[in-house]
Amino acid sequence: MLIPSGGVVDAEVAAPPSKSLTIRALAAAALADGRSALRRPLFSDDTFAMASALAALGIESARRGGSLMVEGRGGLIPSSGAVLDLGDAGTPLRLLTALCCLGRGRFVLDGSERMRQRPIGDLVEALRQLGVPILTLHGNDCPPVELVAGGFPGGSCRLRGEASSQFLSALLMAGPCGARDLTVTVEGELVSRPYVDLTLRMMADFGASVEQQAGRVFHVRAGIPYQPRMIPIEADASSASYFFAAAAVTGGRIAVTGIPRDSAQGDLAMLPILEAMGCAVRRRGTAIEVIGGSLRGVDADLADAPDLVPTVAAVALFAEGPSTLRRIGHLRWKESDRIEATAACARALGAAAVAEEARLTIVPPGAGRAGLRGAAIDPRGDHRLAMAFTVAGLAVPGVVITDPSCVSKSFPDFFDVLLPLVSGR
């Protein structure tokens, strides 16, 4: 897809629903005792993968208008065993690995070729500590995962926090339905902490509670089942970041509606980053408004907002001076090796990029944005790369996204929403 360039964003737009919150709400609703309604969820590849896997476990859901109705089974997994193919859906696979422990029988969780390269060993080891018979079938700490479930046992375990916050979220979400209370002690740095906060908030919305000690020890009481709820899904800060970035690179203005002031989404970190780069950011009623300005390089710690890395990198192409994105080592195990892939995309457009183990530096060409050039961008099947470098293409003629369909993982109508916002081409 050739990205039309040369226009300026000047618009107001509603952010799409949150992928992260939709998947967590589906999991909680599946474990609730009765019917729940998810209002305005995100209907995307990951949502469909999660719903399909739950159906294979005996937990049905159905789309009704703009809502998703889920028939919860009170913490039970009706199926006596299943083989689940989650494709590229990482969050569903991690959550379901723990949730399948609630069943009784043999369960196998598998995915795409890329999913088979994404480590899950820390979660497997934590479940082993709880007494779950579980292993990775290829012996490499990656899916496929096989477990023989006899109910989630609860108990105490230790979990490394450096690889993915989703492992902790998976354990916590299964906890209220366990045979005993659950205590998880996190060792080392807990990356992407805001996503754990989203999990805790969603659990609370469905009637469960988690006690914390110093943000490192998490205790979940068993025997207090999730309650069915009617839950509105909050708009997505991750998807909104592309709109904000579009205003920055085109020197325009965007007002994004739908994200509440008390949102716990970590990707709202895009706003102070853009301010540091020279944009104006303000709340205007129910909207967040970003106005582009003269951009300068930034030094940003993105340990808690890893999905922003390609987007900040794309904006950094147009800045004066280099930008360094730090503490992002866990990005090597996303839908792509997102550090190397982002660097490759930046180089294709004429910038210099230095990819280190846990850091990425973007150096714009010496001639500024005039030194950038169009190129074919291969997002490597990674939706975040496709969307971030589409934004770059709004200001660089000749950018072609070679696999635009991969955006369906989190924002299926991305191009239909973003491109009409650009005027004056």
Image (cartoon, grey):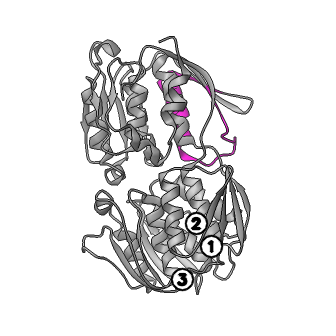
Q: Which residue is mark 2?
A: 27
237 relative to 142 in the view: left or right: right
Residue at 49% over, 72% down: 185
- Give 281 or 423, whichever is nearer the viewer: 423
Residue 315 in magenta?
Answer: no
Is 69 above or below relative to 391? below
Q: Which residue is mark 1?
A: 31
Q: Tell me whether the residue at label 1 lies in contact with that at label 3, contact meaning CB atoms closer than 8 angstroms.
A: no
Between the C-alphas of marks 3 and 2, the distance is: 18 Å
Mark 3 sits on what residue? Answer: 154
Give the numbered dot on residue 16: none
Amino acid type at image mark 1: Leu
Q: Specify the amino acid type for callout 3.
A: Gly
Query: Which of the two discs, 1 and 3, labels the residue nearer the N terminus?
Result: 1
Identify the amino acid type marked 2.
Ala
Q: Taking the image as drawn, is residue 352 in sight?
A: no
